[in-house]
Structure formats: C-alpha cells, structure tokens
C-alpha cells in the first residue's frame, strides 16, 4: 500500500515555529500580528494561499513582502532542527519493512522539504513527494493524482494521512482513503467532519489500521 503523509503537523512538530515566523514577518510588513489560533488554522496550505487567507486586505506588494520575510524568518530559525513527532521513525521503518511505500504531500516548498529531508536523513524513505510550489495547493487533489501517476499505485491501494481538513478534503476530492491525526493543528471535531476512515492519536497507531497490518 502507498502511505502518503502530510509533513507539518503530521510528521514534523513545526506549528510553533510557523506561527512565530508568520507573526514576525507580518510585523515587518506592517500588517496585523495575528493570534496563534488564526495562523495555526492555515498550516497545510501553500504559502501564497496561506497569506491570502490570513490577510485578504493586503495588496499584492504586501503579500509578496510577507512571503519573502516569512522565508527569511524561517531560514533564520534553522539553527535548531525541528523535532519529529514521537514514534515517526520507528513507524516509518515498520511500514517499509512490511512492504508498503511512503510518499509526502505537503504545503511546504520544495526547498523547505528538501532541507528537512537532509536535516533528518529521511529522503531515502520516500518514493516520491509533492510540494505546494510544484502543483496545486491543498485541498485540490492534484498532488495526490500526480503521486499516484508517478508511483503507478492504484487509488484503492493508497491512503492520505494528515492533521488538517485540507489533507482530508484533498483525499476526499481524489476519492482516496484518509486517516486524520489528532495531535496536529486541527481539532478532532474538524477532522471528524471530513469523514476520514480513522483518526489516530499517536503516529504509531497507523500500524493498527487493518490495510497496513503486516
């Protein structure tokens, strides 16, 4: 089976850094410094879509500056690698050992994902990945259809795993099975409303979903 993973909020515990970087960037542009809850709500979208959602009143120049400053703030915070969620490494190894394939579908940029692959030494685990600056942002299903096309995996033998309604709605649009993770940025109630096949509270619980049981 092909297990397609969201990154931020599902594999990597990056919420607090994303929020802090967006707050600092918006302050530099002269836009309102939004509450953590508002910024957390857009985690998972591509950066242009996130900025447009957070600051609909901003003009195109302000939005471009905000994207640039956010990238600068993110790079400046790189000295300390972001932690992976508990159980991620062991679970990925067990999934691969059971013969499953792994992929990533993320709102990050390609450059950002490659940096994190390098920092954690994980690139070799994933057969394919798609980033928001390469294709349509979630919840458009194009990331998933491109991943399926590249891997040759049938739709019925794939599952999308993510922590936001953007992930689960993307899977629904592609008619793909989905699993929500409750420890990320969107509440269990929001995930449940998207009707995933399962909601898990710890990454290792992926191994208990029947189609993934060795």
Image: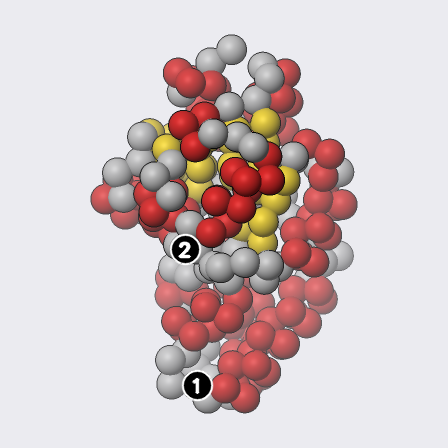
Residue at the spot 31% in from the left edge and 36% down from the top edge: 196
Say which of marks 1 and 2 sits in front. 2
Spot occupied by residue 95 in the image (x, y as percentages of width and height)? 57, 21
User: On screen, 119 above or below 73?
Assistant: above
3D distance between C-alphas at marks 1 and 2: 24 Å
200 to 116, vertically: above or below: above
Q: Quadrant of residue 160?
A: top left
Residue 75, given in percent of the width and then of the height, sits at 71, 64
Check the image and name the residue furthest to the top. 214
Q: Nearer the viewer, residue 92 or 36?
A: 92
Q: How many marks?
A: 2
**Lateral position of residue 14 relative to residue 113, left or right:** left
Q: SS at mark 2?
A: loop
Q: Residue at x 71, y 37 (%)?
A: 122
x and y, in percent, of residue 12 in the image: 57, 44
Q: Which mark is residue 140?
A: 2
Q: Which residue is mark 1?
A: 58
Q: Secondary structure at mark 1?
A: loop
| Residue at x 53%, y 46% (from the top left corner) | 146
Evaluate whether residue 16 shows in this view. Answer: no
**Which tag, 1 or 2, sits closer to the chain's start?**
1
Q: Is residue 70 above or below residue 124?
A: below
Q: Is residue 163 above or below residue 209?
A: below
Side of 118 where 25 appears, left or right: left
- The 10 Å Cα crowd at callout 2, few under 14, some 14 to 19, many 20 or more, is some
Quadrant location of residue 52? bottom left
């Amino acid at each position: 089976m092909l297990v397609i993973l969201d990154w931020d909020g599902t594999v990597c515990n990056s919420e607090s850094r994303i929020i802090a970087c967006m707050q600092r960037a918006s302050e530099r542009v002269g836009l309102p410094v939004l509450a953590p809850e508002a910024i957390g709500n857009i985690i998972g979208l591509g950066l242009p879509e996130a900025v447009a959602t957070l600051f609909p009143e901003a003009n195109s120049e302000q939005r471009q500056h905000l994207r640039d400053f956010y990238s600068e703030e993110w790079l400046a915070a790189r000295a300390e690698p972001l932690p992976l969620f508990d159980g991620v490494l062991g679970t990925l190894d067990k999934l691969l050992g059971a013969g499953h394939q792994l992929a990533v579908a993320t709102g990050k940029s390609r450059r950002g994902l490659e940096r994190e692959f390098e920092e954690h030494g994980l690139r070799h685990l994933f057969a394919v990945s798609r980033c928001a600056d390469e294709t349509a942002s979630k919840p458009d299903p194009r990331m998933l259809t491109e991943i399926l096309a590249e891997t040759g995996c049938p739709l019925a033998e794939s599952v999308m795993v993510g922590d936001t309604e953007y992930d689960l709605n993307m899977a629904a649009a592609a008619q793909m099975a989905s699993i929500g993770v409750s420890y990320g940025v969107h509440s269990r109630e929001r995930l449940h409303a998207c009707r995933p096949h399962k909601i898990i509270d710890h990454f290792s619980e992926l191994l208990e979903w029947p189609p993934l049981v060795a």
